[in-house]
Image (tube, rainbow, N blue to C red):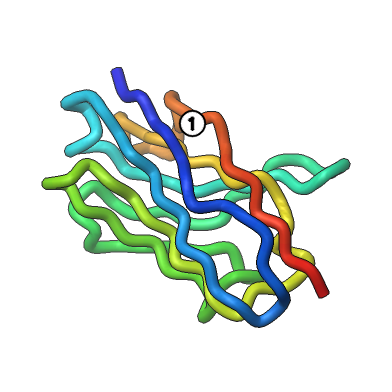
Amino acid sequence: QVQLVESGGGLVQAGESLTLSCAASGRTFITAAMGWFRQAPGKEREFVARITWNGGITSYVDSVKGRFTISRDNARKMVYLQMNSLKPEDTAIYYCAADPSRVGKYDYWGQGTQVTVSS
């Protein structure tokens, strides 16, 4: 079992930066792959970034490559999403998710945090 709580969302202007945090509880977190997803108004939820259990491999959707960085601190049970050079199209609710089986199946989700980027 993993509980996830996101924080760090807010309203920023285009070009600015924001860091999202995801606090996890539960022993399964340590061995779980973690991901960030987002859902914009009127759109389906989309994958943003993923990190393996030990942080060794990360992957990103093309639209955020070079701007976003996912990281994790297993000792603190935290996952982060550093977002730079934000664009209005990054506006969405951002969700943290856990993939305990490490096969791309996200079984646990947070409640989400709103990110709004003004132009």
69 up-or-down from 1: above or below: below
Instruction: Report the residue at 49% width, 52% height from top.
Output: 8
Point out the residue furthest to the right here.
42
**Disc 1 residue crowd, few under 14, some 14–19, many 20+, Cα 10 Å:** many
Is residue 111 rendered to the left or right of residue 115? left
Is residue 96 rendered to the left or right of residue 56? right
Instruction: Report the residue at 38% width, 37% height from top.
Output: 103
Instruction: Report the residue at 44% width, 59% height from top.
Output: 81
Residue 9: x and y in percent read 57, 52
SS at mark 1 in the image: loop
Point out the residue furthest to the top here.
1
Front residue of this view, candidates 29 and 93? 93
Instruction: Report the residue at 31% width, 30% height from top.
Output: 101
Residue 23: x and y in percent read 33, 39
Q: Quadrant of residue 22?
A: top left
Residue 45: x and y in percent read 69, 41
11 up-or-down from 68: above or below: above
Point out the residue furthest to the left here.
75
Is residue 9 rendered to the left or right of residue 91? left
- Rendered-image quadrant of the N terminus: top left
Residue 63: x and y in percent read 66, 70
Q: Quadrant of residue 28?
A: top left
- Rendered-image quadrant of the C terminus: bottom right
Q: Which residue is mark 1?
A: 110
Q: How many marks?
A: 1
51 up-or-down from 84: above or below: above
Report the amino acid beneath label 1. Gly
53 up-or-down from 91: above or below: above
